[in-house]
Every structure is written in structure tokens, then in C-alpha cells.
Amino acid sequence: EFVVRDDLERMKEYHRLRRIEPDATPKEYEFQFIDRKDNVKDVLLSVDVISGTKKSVASLLDITERKRAEEQLRESEERYRELADFLPQTVFEFDERGNFTFSNRHGFQTFGYTLEDFDKGLNVLQMLVPEDRDRAKKNIQKVLSGEELGGNEYAALRKDGSTFPAIIYSTPIIHDNKPVGLRGFVIDITERKRIEISMQGKPVQQPVKTGIH
């Protein structure tokens, strides 16, 4: 027996059901196979019943490398998310339609949304005041097309309706050489704006002249 025991029992059950009700069993599934060197291989099995008979036809595909690459990608993404949660700024990802696919902990705290809100679906335009949304749409398309814009200033909108000034930086997410969304971060510039306003109207200090006359 070269099939991992747990998978073997499952495959036997599929085989039994396929003879009784072919449509009730999957035509494609994965299992693990042990080769002659005791290496565990991931295999994709495609199987179907030949019409008018009780015979099956099947094909096997070794997907070990693909599964390993997927696992490495998951581990890399997990490290990225753990790091993002430590950052003191909002870090985000959204797809080409503007629907959020990731936010770090700071993002939820800053904008007042919950994981339940996130699971129901949130769009980046919900985070901006209405008068900034058309400009944001255009900038998103520019970044997706490869244009580098740097930071863009917007009036950010929290769930409770309050606003704050922010600069948003973003860059394309590329999969298979195609842009599939944006990732970036949000900087709250409330304090900077407050200082700028407090400095307005203050007299300019003249340099102090020193020396012996």
C-alpha cells in the first residue's frame, strides 16, 4: 500500500459510492502517496466512470512542488500579516474593484470597523468623504496601470462619520505579471495639520543681529 492510510480509506469509500451514484462523488481530489524512498508526494487524482459501464478511468498528477510552493507562500503571507499588525499605521490591501482583502489591527482601530464588517465586505471608497471619491477612483486606476503617484492626501472617513486628514501611499499587487489590486498604508496627518494651522498668522521672527558696533 503506497497511499497514506487515512487517504486510502477515503478513496475506497469514493470508489464504492462511485459504483452506486457516480454524481455523488468528486471527480477530482487530492491524496498523499508514499514513493519507494519513503518520500510523501501530493497527488491530484482525476477520475470518472466510463459511460454505460462500471469501469473507471483515472489520471494522476504529481502536485508536490505546487503544494510546497503554496505552503511557502502561506507562511510568507502569515509573516507579513504578523509584521503589519505591529506597525503604528494602517496597512491595507484591496482588489481591483476596491474591495478590501486585508487590513492590519491599526486599520480596524483607526476606522472603527470590526472583523464582522470586513467579512461582509468593505470598499476603499467607504473610507473617504464623498467629495474625494472620484479623485481616488482615478488615482487607483493610475496606480494599477503602473503610474507612480507618491502619497495622495484625502479626507478619511471613519465608520462613526468622523473624519481626519490622511496621506495614502499605494503600489500595485502583481500576480502572474498582472495587477490584481493595491497594497499600501495610511498616515494620519491630523497633528501636522494642527501645527500648520497654529502657525498661520504668527509674525515671522526677524533674525537677531549680533556683533560689535
Image (tube, grey):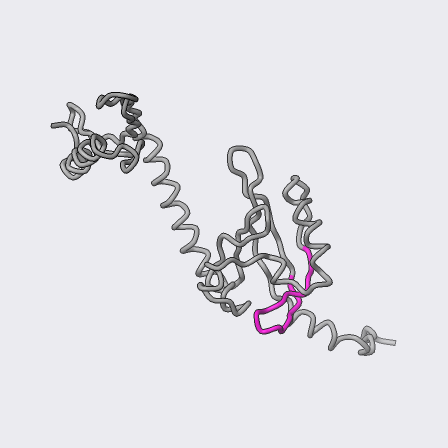
* Place of residue 72 in the rendered image (x, y in percent of width and height, measured from the top left): 36, 40
Between residues 1 and 207, which one lies in front from this camera angle?
1
Residues in magenta, as a range = 152-166
- In this picture, is 91 found above or below 28? below
| Screen quadrant of the N terminus | top left
Taking 183 as reference, is 133 left or right? right
Magenta-drawn stretch, dominant element (helix, strand or loop): strand
Residue 211 is at least partly visible in this image: no
Which quadrant holds residue 12? top left
Which quadrant holds residue 177? top right
Residue at 69% across, 50% down? 139
**How many callouts does the rendering have?**
0
Seen as rendered, the residue at the extreme left is 1
Residue at 57% across, 48% down? 182
Taking 8 as reference, is 166 left or right? right
Q: Is residue 145 magenta?
A: no
Q: Is residue 153 magenta?
A: yes
Between residues 201 and 179, which one lies in front from this camera angle?
179
* Place of residue 76 in the rendered image (x, y in percent of width and height, measured from the top left): 39, 45
Seen as rendered, the residue at the extreme right is 213
Which quadrant holds residue 25? top left
Residue at 63% across, 58% down? 125
* Place of residue 38 in the rendered image (x, y in percent of width and height, measured from the top left): 15, 28
* Place of residue 209 in the rendered image (x, y in percent of width and height, measured from the top left): 83, 74
Residue at 50% across, 68% down? 109
Residue 112 is at least partly visible in this image: yes
Taking 38 as reference, is 104 left or right? right
- In this picture, is 131 found above or below 30? below
| Screen quadrant of the C terminus | bottom right
